[in-house]
Amino acid sequence: MNAGYKYTKMGYPTEGQNHHAGIKNEKDIVDFQNANQNNAINKHFRGANETTNWKHKGGTRMKEDAICESGETVHKISFKNHKSGTFDWMNTSKNIPAEITNNVKQFKLENDGGEITKTLRIELEQIFSNGFDNFDSDFIESLLNKIINNYPEYTIINCAKKKELIMINKREFTHFKKHPEDEFVFKSTKRAKTSRQIWLKKHDGSELNTNLRLRMHLNNGITAIFGKKGAVPCLKIQQDNVMSFIASCANKVTVRY
């Protein structure tokens, strides 16, 4: 903890932990920011005001996890936790191509009541793997634009291993925006049947790895599709190579704790 900072215990839910742990971590960051008015993130927002006031928001219908009030100005902020691996920018069941949803429905009809075997799981994976053929460059671009359009102005990434809060402006997301003659393409890896890397094939012949990945999955898993709860196909945009992405952001604001 930097000298002069008040200690506020912060938790770091690892991938797969429940929603409540994530909410607690969001509240811990809000408490930390309120308790440490002189750190760089607060100074960025404060301007001529002497203090900032952070409030936790969250909820499934909004992208902002918190707001920072500085005088009469209100800044909306999302939080991302990064201990290792990746984090998600989007998880949606909207605008899934009809061919994919119909194939999943047929899969359910043909296998309902049977044992969920490894073969059955592979069959579902293949449905999703084939489904990527339904996505062209324009569709991929529309998904990426939703990130830019729907996210609040700022995102704070909690880098647990470095004990840093790193704030970026969503303008940094445009590093993968394309020239009119460029196109987005998928690249696959041997084992990743249900996901594809998103690359930008440029008009000059070069290629750029956006470090983003599109995943296709069931929102409640294969067991739920045969149960009362049910399950539907979803698309998830995942941030790979998180530290490389952070390093590429020119105007980030960093606070150590």
Image (cartoon, rainbow, N blue to C red):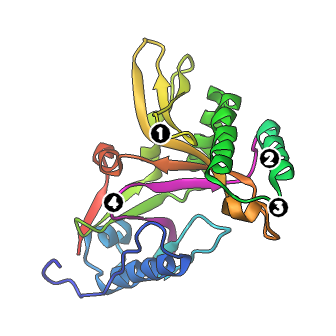
* Dot 1 and dot 3 residues touching (CB under 8 Å): no
Comes first in the chain, label 4 or label 1? 4
Comes first in the chain, label 3 or label 2? 2
Comes first in the chain, label 1 or label 2? 2
Which disc number belongs to residue 204? Answer: none
Above or below — where is 8 with respect to 70?
A: below
Comes first in the chain, label 2 or label 4? 4
Q: What is the spatial separation of the Cα atoms under label 2 and label 4, in whole angstroms?
A: 35 Å
In the picture of the structure, the residue carrying the numbered disc 4 is 84
Q: Main secondary structure of the magenta part?
A: strand
Quarter of the figure that contains the C terminus: bottom left
Which disc number belongs to residue 191? Answer: 1
Q: What is the spatial separation of the Cα atoms under label 3 and label 2, in whole angstroms?
A: 12 Å
Residue 51 visible? The answer is no
Closest to the observer: 178 or 161?
Answer: 161
Which residue lies at the image location 58% right of the left edge and 43% below the top edge?
Answer: 194
- Disc 2 is placed on an element classified as helix
Which disc number belongs to residue 107? Answer: 2
- Disc 3 is placed on an element classified as loop
Boundaries of the magenta span: 71-96
Q: What is the spatial separation of the Cα atoms under label 3 and label 4, in whole angstroms?
A: 38 Å
